[in-house]
Amino acid sequence: MKQPLKIAHISDIHLSGANDRSHAARLTRLLQHLRNEQFDHLVITGDLGNHADPDEWRVVQQLLKQTEWYHWERCTILPGNHDLMNLEEEMRLYNALNPIQWFRQKAFQRKRQLFCELFYEIMGGKNQTFPFLKILNYPTLRLALVALDSVAAWHPSTNPLGARGFIEPQQLTALQQPQIAEALRSCVVIGLCHHAYNVYGTDSLIDQAFDWTMELQNRDAFFSLMQQLGASIVLHGHFHRFQSYQKEGITFINGGCFRYNPYRYSELLLEADGSFQQQFLSLEEKEER
C-alpha cells in the first residue's frame, strides 16, 4: 500500500534577533523531529524574524541546512511582513513624514529581492521573485506549490501597522497565463501566502478595527485565482492561530505561531487521488507515544 505524502507546515517563527539562541534551539529541535518523522516536504509561511534583519534570515537558513531541510525539493519558504519591514523604522519621523511613497516602495522591493536572493535555492530559483511555482514529482502524486507574496509596504493611512496584506495585480496576472494552467495539469495544487484569508470576524467595533489592520485587502481576487488554478488547499500564517477553515471547496490551513508555541505544527497527509487529512500535532505528545 502506497504511503501518503507528508507535508509539515510551520509559520511565524519570530526570532528576536540573530542572537536569540534559546528560540533557535527550539526551532532546531522541531526541525530535527520533522526530519526523524520522515516528512517529505516542509513549508514555512513567513515571519522568520521580528526586525526585517537579514541576519535573522541567515540563522533560519543555517538551521535548515544543519537539519538537512535546505533543498529545493524538501523545503519551501516565504517572507512575512516582519521579514520585509521594520515598523519602528518605518514610523520614524523622517520616514513617516516623507510624502513620496515611491521611495518607501522601492526600499520595500529591494528588501524582498534580498530575501529571494538569499533563499533562492528553496524558493523559485535564481533571479526569480514572486510569484513562483514548484512542481514536485513524487511516487504517489505530482504536487504543485503556487507561492505568492502577500506582504504590502508600510503606508501611513492604508497600512499604518504594516500588517495588512496585498497581492500585487502583476502576481495574479502572471499566474493566469495559459502555460500555467497547462503546467498544473494532473497536479495536486496547494497555494501559499503569508496572510490569512479569514481573520476573526466579529461584531465588536474594536475587534473589527484590529481585523482591518491584519486583513488581506484583495482576498477575493486571491481566492478566485486559487479556484481558477484548481487549488484544494492554501497554507498561510500571519494570524497567530493554529486553525483550518473552508470556503467553497478550498481548505485554508493557518500554521499558527512558532514563537508562541514552538512544539506545535501542522501535518498534512496527501493521497494519490488528491484527498487529504490534516491535523495539528504537538512535539511533546509525539515524543510521549
Image (tube, helix red, strand yellow):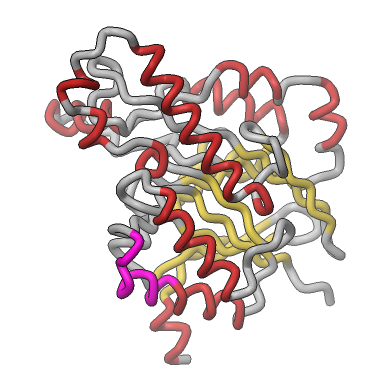
In the drawing, does residue 76 fall left or right of residue 11? right
Q: Is residue 135 visible?
A: yes
Q: Classify 121 as above or below 279.
A: above
Query: Which of the 4 quarters of the picture holds residue 180?
Result: top right
In the drawing, does residue 260 fall left or right of residue 219? left
In the drawing, does residue 283 fall left or right of residue 227? left
Give x and y (percent) for residue 258.
Answer: 37, 62
Give x and y (percent) for residue 133.
Answer: 72, 39
Which is more toward the observer, 77 or 221?
77
Q: Mainly helix, strand or loop, the magenta region?
A: helix
Which is more toward the observer, 179 or 113?
113
In the drawing, does residue 174 fall left or right of residue 289? right
Q: Is residue 20 covered in magenta?
A: yes
Query: Which of the 4 quarters of the picture holds residue 6?
Result: bottom right
Most distant residue in the bottom direction: 289
Query: Where is the N terminus found, in terms of image quarters?
Result: bottom right
| Count of labels in the image | 0
Q: Classify 67 as above or below 5.
A: below
Q: Is residue 182 covered in magenta?
A: no
Give x and y (percent) for residue 40.
Answer: 69, 67
Q: Is residue 243 visible?
A: no
Residues drawn in magenta: 18-27
Q: Residue at x 63, y 34 (%)?
A: 129
Q: Residue at x 48, y 58 (%)?
A: 58
Q: Residue at x 79, y 53 (%)?
A: 136
Most distant residue in the front direction: 94
Q: Classify 66 as above or below 166.
A: below
Give x and y (percent) for residue 165.
Answer: 40, 29
Which is more toward the observer, 138 or 248?
138
Q: Residue at x 80, y 59 (%)?
A: 272
